[in-house]
Image (cartoon, rainbow, N blue to C red):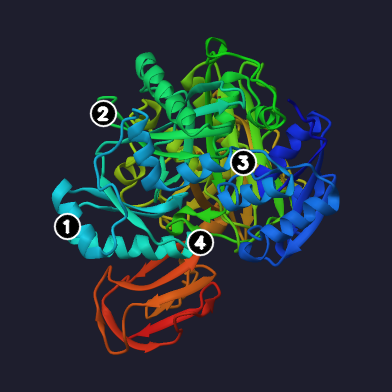
Amino acid sequence: MTNTIDKILIANRGEIACRVIRTAKERGIKTVAVYSDADKYSLHVQLADEAVHIGGSASSESYLKMDAIVDAVKATGAQAVHPGFGFLSENADFAKRLNHEGIVFIGPGVRAIQAMGDKIESKKLANEAGVNTVPGHPDAVPDADTAYAVAQKIGCPVMLKASAGGGGKGMRVANTLDEVKEGFISAQNEARTSFGDDRVFVEKFIEQPRHIEIQIIADQHGNCLYLGERECSIQRRHQKVLEEAPSSFISDATRKAMGEQAVSLSQAVDYQSAGTVEFIVDANEQFYFLEMNTRLQVEHPVTECITGLDLVGLMIDVAEGKKLPMQQSDIKLNGWSFEARVYAEDPDRGFLPSIGRITHYQPPAQNAFDAPAGVRVDTGIHAGGEISMYYDPMIAKLVTWAPSRMEAIAKMQEALDNYQIESVQHNIPFLSALFDHPAFQAGELTTRFIEDHFADGFNSATYRSALIDQLPVVAAVIESRHRQRLGACSDSDVGDLHVIDSLDPDNKTVITAEERAELGSGWQPGEPLLTGTLNSDQVSVGVKRIGNQWQLSHRGSVRRFQVMPSHVASLMVHMPEKSVQDLSKYLLSPMPGLLMKVLVNEGDSVSVGQDLAVIEAMKMENTLKAEKAGTVEKIVANSGDNLAVDAVIMEFT
């Protein structure tokens, strides 16, 4: 029996709410957005047919309030709720409440959510369904001492993982027994804060692992299909950064075996709707069950790109009681797709979150995927939109498709080059560096990729892109155009220009008019992106005027250049150097957040790298460390304080 859905309330925000609205509009289905105080002017509110305010900015006061969401459904006459991901998407009580109210939940049944929402119980069910599982302790461990004993038995490294976890929260790897107790307590605290459930279990950590997941779709008539795999191995702090489909590592035989096991597990819990079964895979293609996510995944677009299926549309079909319109033999994988998660965070400062209002926002041009190569941008942000401290700092998901893996990488690099975001820090330079890395391009991936290849972190000022040595030419060209605009002179009148790299102020590169002519571009002052040819190569360079310098960005490199005529450059030696304020005697908060713990006392001596304080921001714990040795003279902030950026936490002597 089928029930037509005419209006859907989306119990979420940001890009996933916009994504659901897009499919609903294509189907002629009305949509209702819900929003918090912080999201009053957000894009998903503007795109929906109706919008209902449901509470304060904190998610606990809005997007996690079941009563407010149910009241909004009733007030607007919506027949169904799509939960997106995060928030209440895997909350069995929420699904049960909707069922009780006669509201359609566009997701799986309560039993499946309950069974798969608990990592310990889901592992037991996976064993019973014949799914490969990671060796470990079958139950949650009550305390750090028990965790230590389990780790002794199964051997390190071990994974300490929150039973109710997700999104990388409540997860720690202990490489040695000495790290087990501290890791257990940290995982337990983060789990309690994030999920209200501090149960943690211990399992063997698979070395040289790949994180590969199987997308499934199942209807209410017993049909369940697997839609290929996604490679999600590029992670930072257990959070996915890049995803691709298919995996360059998985053979057809392994894909089939993983898919069939994913289907077996889904059928064991009478699964209905879209879902994902996640596996950890070792270097020999041996795979082990991690967890099942009973919702739409963040990275679902790459599966849509290689299968041609609309997963949100299929979820609506299933919720209406329709049979799946295809069989397993109909599922064909076509081409290659990548997703890059564009975040408001600063890679140069340890990926600290960045908040604020976006003053300029111009994503790369999107085009259809039936073209030679395609670009898709899933976002909940627009110019004037705000990145709030209350939610995940995702700006967008940038997705590309092409017939081959290397073509899809090239399309992604081009798209990243053309992405323009101003006024908040973002991770686009780091994403560009990842796609440019030889090991990534060769498909040599593990979940330790970032740790292994960027062991000292990432610094866009020192990263060397392929064009780095040519950036002085670009700086000289834009300076000459700038001078032409100011003085209405020709390029030849400008003469030779001296380009000083801010990283090496004693080194001057002299660029002649003939050298400037090698760059062919129609760039004009004020444009944030220079595109053209340099020595016959196509280039895209981000351009920003900062004081008397030009900031240029290209494929992971961000450099500042000062450009001047010869007679000015000769006088630079007489300019006094600016004094720099010494802030090393202070521990400053690098982000807005809640001071969870102060780990030292006044009078303590501290060493380089010692943990000093823990700040919680955007539901993640961040440990601040000492940059140099010293003595704690004064503790300025207290545990429980809300801190602004650069707020003083303690002083040193």
Q: Which of the two discs, 3 and 4, sits closer to the camera?
A: 4
- Whether the residues at callouts 4 and 2 have beta carbons within 8 Å, the answer is no
The residue lying at 32 percent from left, 34 percent from top is 127
Q: Quadrant of residue 231?
A: top left
Q: CA distance from mark 3 to mark 4?
A: 45 Å
Tell me which amino acid carries mark 3: Val
Q: Which residue is mark 1?
A: 149
Q: Is residue 141 visible?
A: yes
Mark 4 or mark 2: which comes first in sequence? 2
Q: Is residue 511 visible?
A: no
- In this rendering, is residue 217 above or below 476? above
Q: CA distance from mark 4 to mark 2?
A: 33 Å
Q: Which of the two discs, 4 and 1, sits closer to the camera?
A: 1
Give residue 618's position: percent from left, percent from top: 53, 61
- Whether the residues at callouts 2 and 1 have beta carbons within 8 Å, the answer is no
Label 1 CA crowd tier, 10 Å (few <14, some 14–19, many 20+): some
Quarter the C terminus occupies: bottom left
The residue lying at 59 percent from left, 24 percent from top is 305
Q: Which residue is mark 3?
A: 477
Q: Which residue is mark 4?
A: 619
Q: Which residue is mark 2?
A: 283
- In this rendering, is residue 647 above or below 561? below
